[in-house]
Image: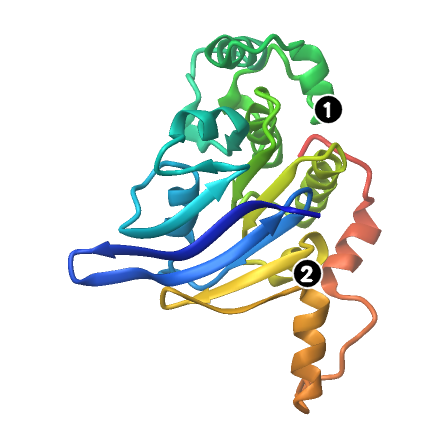
């Protein structure tokens, strides 16, 4: 794999406060890359710079060969950014919203095929506000792929969802990656990052303090002699919930 995103010595200052402190990393084409960290770590600022939504103070960012200093319009054409609820017109149904975005992107799309991809084919005449939490997130992700982007950015896509809806969304994310799309994801759920991500970068206080595959980071910790204070069981409560309620997609 080759790097589709390259970040070198990225700095972002707000007055005297340095939110991002000279970080460097690469995202490989076709991987699911997680950017993790506590609130205030600088991860959202970093992503917003890569997404061309925020100006950097210094450093270099290259996206699919395009410089963020010179080629912002070209970068915007090849990325998809997950929208929040406020990004959708409340009076339009899902088919109308898809047609609207299709027109904005100048990218023809079959609304029913797109809704089928995210398991919402029976919701085309519904308005966004009428959807459940999981359905809203799946539709939000659907709008990020209308322009057939090379890279999509998902900001905490499963926050607030029940366990079944979370796992359904994981399946959708994997399916999108299987089509060759690179995915950058932020999440506060470490189990989610461990399951989905090929590699993760952990940020704290504006710096990257670890970057590797989840398995390797766990192995490195174990090698230090770390032991959990409680025996790890072969299943957890979330597994119990899914087993009892069924993994089949529902109208969550």
Q: Nearer the viewer, residue 108 or 60?
A: 60
Q: Which residue is mark 1?
A: 117
Left or right of 15 in this view: 143: right
- Which quadrant: the C terminus? top right
On the image, the x and y values in percent for residue 30 come to 69, 42
Q: Could you say which quadrant of the image residue 69 lies in?
A: top left
Number of marks in the image?
2
Q: Secondary structure at mark 1?
A: helix
Determine which of the numbered discs, if any, sits on residue 194 in the image.
2
Residue drawn at (75%, 83%) of the image:
231
On the image, the x and y values in percent for residue 191 come to 66, 61
On the image, the x and y values in percent for residue 59 come to 35, 53
Q: CA distance from mark 2 to mark 1?
A: 25 Å
- Neighbour tally class for label 2: few under 14, some 14-19, many 20 plus, Cα within 10 Å: some
Residue drawn at (68%, 50%) of the image:
163
**Circle 2/circle 1 CB separation < 8 Å:** no
Q: Nearer the viewer, residue 7 or 222?
A: 7
On the image, the x and y values in percent for residue 83 come to 47, 31
Q: Nearer the viewer, residue 23 or 144?
A: 23
Q: Secondary structure at mark 2?
A: helix
Residue drawn at (83%, 44%) of the image:
246
Q: Could you say which quadrant of the image residue 91 lies in?
A: top left
Determine which of the numbered discs, if any, sits on residue 102 in the image.
none
Residue drawn at (26%, 62%) of the image:
18
The relative height of residue 225 versus residue 233 in the rendered view (above or below) is below
């Amino acid at each position: 794999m080759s790097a589709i995103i390259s970040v070198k010595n990225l700095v972002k200052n707000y007055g005297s406060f340095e939110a991002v402190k000279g970080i460097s990393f690469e995202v490989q084409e076709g991987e699911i890359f997680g950017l993790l960290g506590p609130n205030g770590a600088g991860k959202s600022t970093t992503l917003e710079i890569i997404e061309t939504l925020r100006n950097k103070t210094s450093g270099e960012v290259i996206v699919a060969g395009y410089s963020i200093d010179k080629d912002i319009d070209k970068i915007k054409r090849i990325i998809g950014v997950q929208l929040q609820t406020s990004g959708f017109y409340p009076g339009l149904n899902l088919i109308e919203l898809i047609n609207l975005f299709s027109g904005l992107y100048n990218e023809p799309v079959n609304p029913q095929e797109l809704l089928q991809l995210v398991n919402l084919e029976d919701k085309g005449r519904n308005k966004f506000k009428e959807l459940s939490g999981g359905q809203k997130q799946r539709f939000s992700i659907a709008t990020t792929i209308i322009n057939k982007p090379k890279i999509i950015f998902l900001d905490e896509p499963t926050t607030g969802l029940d366990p079944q809806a979370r796992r359904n969304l994981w399946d959708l994310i994997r399916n999108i990656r299987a089509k060759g799309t690179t995915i950058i994801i932020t999440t506060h759920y470490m189990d989610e990052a461990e399951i989905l991500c090929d590699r993760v970068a952990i940020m704290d206080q504006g710096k990257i303090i670890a970057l590797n595959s989840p398995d390797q980071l766990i192995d490195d910790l174990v090698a230090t002699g770390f032991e959990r204070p409680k025996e790890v069981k072969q299943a957890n409560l979330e597994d119990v919930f899914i087993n009892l309620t069924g993994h089949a997609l529902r109208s969550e």
